[in-house]
Image (cartoon, rainbow, N blue to C red):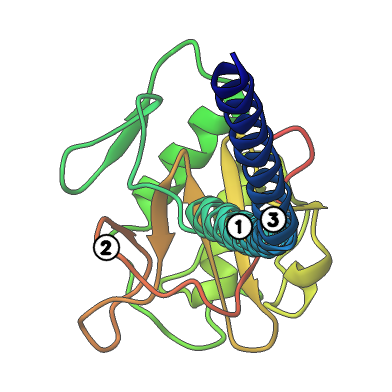
Amino acid sequence: MKTLIRLALTAALFAAATAAKAQNGYSAAGYYAGPQAQAAYAQEQANAQAWAAYNAQQQEYARGWAAYYADQAAAQQQAAAAQQAAAQRAAASRPSVGNSQIRFDGRFASVGQTAPQALQFAVYAANTLQNKPYVLGAGHRNIEDSAYDCSSSTSYVLMKAGLLNRCLSSKEFASYGEAGPGRFITIWVKPGEHVFMTICGLRMDTSGHVAGEGPRWRTQGRNYAGFSPRHPVGF
């Protein structure tokens, strides 16, 4: 019986020692694992903050590049708009060779019977000048003359159309009528140097490829730089 009691006590003591050892081991593991977990958590937090800062920086870069590209696109649009406006201004100052309102057979021009009478008279008057030579100063004293220069031939056409009452010089044409291209007739003036006209886009000019050639209908292009457009009131 005593032996059984001793065995029971021994077993109880062993169990208690084992439990105490297990409890001490768990406490030690918790003691050592706690600081390591805290350090790992702190590192993870630091990494997360670093990535957040990096992502914010990348987003800021992206916004900066987007603003740059938007500015470039706006500048390109403005440049394109400026080029288009310049092209439109150039087109307005360089009329086409004739249009549907006037016909040209290589020597004489004509307009339809429904065209304004003054326009019909202007075209007919220009046709009568097609064989006249160029002489500086001619046509200024006499409306009907054997030769004409740039301003007298332009004046002749306008007087015959009832749109002018006397012969003007190129300087005087700078204040003739109204500024800008006309609906039918445009006078192109470089004061003191040269003047010519276009009727429905067809040019009547003393400037040609032959020296001494007088007023003629011209279908080839010419340089309009330095010329200011004016037109008869209403035309």
Residue ID at (28%, 78%): 213
Q: Quadrant of residue 134?
A: bottom left
Q: Nearer the viewer, residue 72 or 208?
A: 72
Vertical arrangement, residue 27 with respect to residue 19, above or below? below
Q: Residues within 10 Å of mark 1 (few under 14, many from 20)?
A: few
Q: Nearer the viewer, residue 67 or 52?
A: 52
Q: CA distance from mark 2 to mark 1?
A: 73 Å
Q: Find disc 1 in the rendering and name its residue.
A: 62
- First of labels 2, 3 by sequence position: 3
Residue ID at (62%, 21%): 2
Residue 142 visible at all: no
Q: Residues within 10 Å of mark 2 (few under 14, many from 20)?
A: some
Image quadrant for the C terminus?
top right
Q: Are marks 1 and 3 in contact (CB under 8 Å)?
A: no
Q: Nearer the viewer, residue 188 or 130?
A: 188
Vertical arrangement, residue 19 with respect to residue 87, above or below? above
Q: Secondary structure at mark 3?
A: helix
Q: Find disc 3 in the rendering and name its residue.
A: 28
Query: Would residue 158 appear left or right of 98 to someone viewing this image?
Result: right
Q: Quadrant of residue 124?
A: top left
Vertical arrangement, residue 234 with respect to residue 55, above or below? above
Picture coordinates of residue 45, whole percent (x, y): 72, 56
Q: CA distance from mark 1 to mark 3?
A: 51 Å
Q: Amino acid at mark 2?
A: Asn
The disc at residue 48 is none
Picture coordinates of residue 130, whole percent (x, y): 30, 58
Q: CA distance from mark 2 to mark 3?
A: 124 Å
Query: Would residue 82 appear left or right of 149 to someone viewing this image?
Result: right
Query: Would residue 130 appear left or right of 112 to someone viewing this image?
Result: left
Q: Amino acid at mark 1?
A: Ala
Q: Find disc 2 in the rendering and name its residue.
A: 131
